[in-house]
Image (cartoon, grey):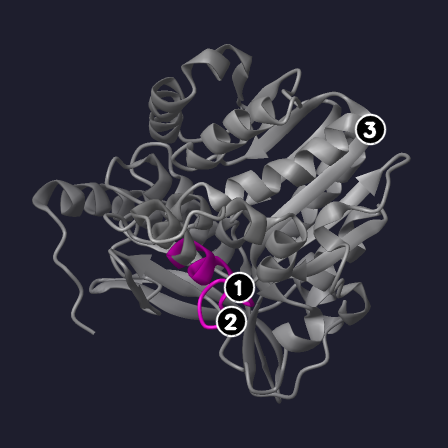
């Protein structure tokens, strides 16, 4: 695949980051785990992917998320959040708010529904993205901007809703290989020509997690230990309310299917997907699919629902939001948005939503039909 060339400034940033990755490799004795490489490539505070100013979201960036298509995803999600806030009170905590498009839609729609949250908090580690989010909210919902606070770390406790849209797929994962000789961690080393793959015997927590999986060697895949740790912490701090996560992924049986024996890791760069994971660190998004069964096992909270994005949005009234006025540009734009959000060939089936609850809660609107918890 021929990828669009980066600018000189982007290349310079990648070279700087590569130097820091080399330093980490040498300090570790010749190799770092893939999880550590992914952490540096995405979250280095100076030149990591999410610290850079290059466009990331939407048609002009590297990938498109549901909130970037238009307001319908956020309007449906707001109806689910409103149901929870009516029972619990409290606020909304969004994990990694991207461009701020989802937050703007949620705040606007929740106000229309008479369910304005006491607080809208955003956990965001990227200073650049915080700035983008502030600009988006100031432009589209200036009257609600005073409700928004930005957090550097998770709060000690929370009442209301915690939401994460395409957050878990960007958390560092361990890369594992199973073969007839044992279970190995795939690590990253360095040579005079650049970054290279190294392989070491898996140890400790990584080995224990890998031994829980039934795969037939040779097999390569990922284990999302950081995603498990995050949802466990969120569950511990949720006093009364719902943790609602949307991402692409599968139940464990599908995630580690025999035919998925090369894993799910992919890079995204200017609307191109590729698997050159060590290429130009800091310039390419790196993501892995989510094992939703592992999330269920990690939280310690009741799972209140699990279904496809298409089913969730339809349960929350997506079809009614399009409105009756046909033969207008707004109607046809909305129809195209619905098609991308719900089509099995687009986002409708690949993306899933899963919910966990703390305290007394009613059956959730978004999972009222086609709940797939039994598949977990």
Which mark sits nearer the N-terminus, 3 or 1?
3
Image side of residue 190 versus residue 349, left or right: left
| Residue in front for this viewpoint, 72 or 323 | 323
Q: Could you say where residue 219 lies in the image, as x and y percent from the top left?
A: 56, 82
**Residue 33 in view, yes or no:** no
| Residue in front for this viewpoint, 187 or 242 | 242
Q: Could you say where residue 196 lies in the image, as x and y percent from the top left?
A: 33, 67
Q: Could you say where residue 187 lies in the image, as x and y percent from the top left?
A: 46, 63
Query: For residue 296, which quarter of the picture?
Result: bottom right
| Residue in front for this viewpoint, 70 or 138 | 70
Q: Is residue 339 magenta?
A: yes
Q: Could you say where residue 179 lies in the image, as x and y percent from the top left?
A: 59, 85
Which mark sits nearer the N-terminus, 3 or 2?
3
Q: What number of labels is visible?
A: 3
Label number found at residue 186: none
- Report which residue position mark 3 lands on: 87
How many residues crowd mark 2 within 10 Å: few (<14), some (14–19), many (20+)? some
Label number found at residue 344: 2
Residue at 67%, 35% (x, y): give it: 81
Residues under labels 3 and 1: Cα distance?
A: 29 Å
Circle 2/circle 1 CB separation < 8 Å: yes
Question: Which residue range is magenta in the image?
Answer: 336-350
Label number found at residue 348: 1
Residue at 51%, 71% (x, y): give it: 344
Residues under labels 3 and 2: Cα distance?
A: 33 Å
Image side of residue 68 versus residue 158, left or right: left
């Amino acid at each position: 695949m021929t990828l669009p060339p980066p600018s000189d400034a982007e290349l310079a940033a990648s070279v700087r980051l590569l130097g820091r990755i080399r330093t980490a490799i040498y300090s570790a004795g010749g190799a770092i785990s893939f999880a550590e490489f992914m952490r540096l490539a995405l979250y280095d505070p100076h030149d990591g992917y999410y610290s850079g100013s290059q466009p990331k979201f939407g048609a002009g960036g590297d990938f498109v998320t549901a909130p970037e298509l238009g307001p319908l995803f956020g309007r449906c999600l707001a109806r689910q959040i409103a149901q929870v806030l009516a029972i619990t009170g409290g606020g909304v905590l969004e994990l990694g708010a991207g461009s701020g498009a989802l937050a703007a839609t949620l705040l606007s729609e929740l106000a229309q529904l008479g369910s304005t949250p006491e607080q809208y908090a955003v956990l965001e580690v990227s200073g650049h993205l915080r700035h983008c989010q502030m600009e988006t909210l100031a432009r589209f919902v200036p009257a609600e901007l005073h409700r928004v606070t930005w957090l550097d770390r998770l709060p000690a406790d929370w009442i209301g809703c915690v939401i994460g849209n395409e957050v878990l797929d960007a958390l560092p994962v361990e890369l594992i290989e199973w073969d007839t000789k044992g279970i190995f961690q795939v690590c990253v080393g360095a040579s005079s020509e650049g970054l290279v793959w190294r392989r070491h015997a898996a140890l400790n927590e990584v080995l224990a997690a890998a031994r829980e999986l039934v795969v037939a060697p040779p097999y390569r895949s990922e284990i999302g230990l950081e995603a498990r740790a995050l949802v466990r912490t969120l569950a511990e701090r949720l006093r009364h309310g719902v943790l609602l996560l949307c991402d692409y992924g599968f139940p464990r049986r599908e995630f580690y299917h025999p035919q998925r024996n090369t894993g799910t890791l992919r890079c995204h760069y200017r609307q191109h997907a590729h698997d050159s994971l060590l290429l130009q660190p800091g310039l390419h998004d790196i993501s892995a699919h989510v094992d939703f069964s592992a999330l269920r096992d990690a939280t310690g909270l009741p799972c209140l629902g699990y279904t496809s994005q298409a089913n969730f949005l339809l349960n929350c009234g997506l079809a009614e939001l399009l409105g009756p006025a046909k033969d207008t540009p707004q109607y046809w734009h909305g129809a195209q948005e619905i098609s991308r959000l719900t089509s099995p060939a687009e986002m409708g089936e690949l993306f899933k939503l899963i919910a966990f609850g703390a305290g007394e809660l009613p059956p959730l609107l978004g999972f009222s039909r086609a709940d797939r918890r039994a598949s977990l």
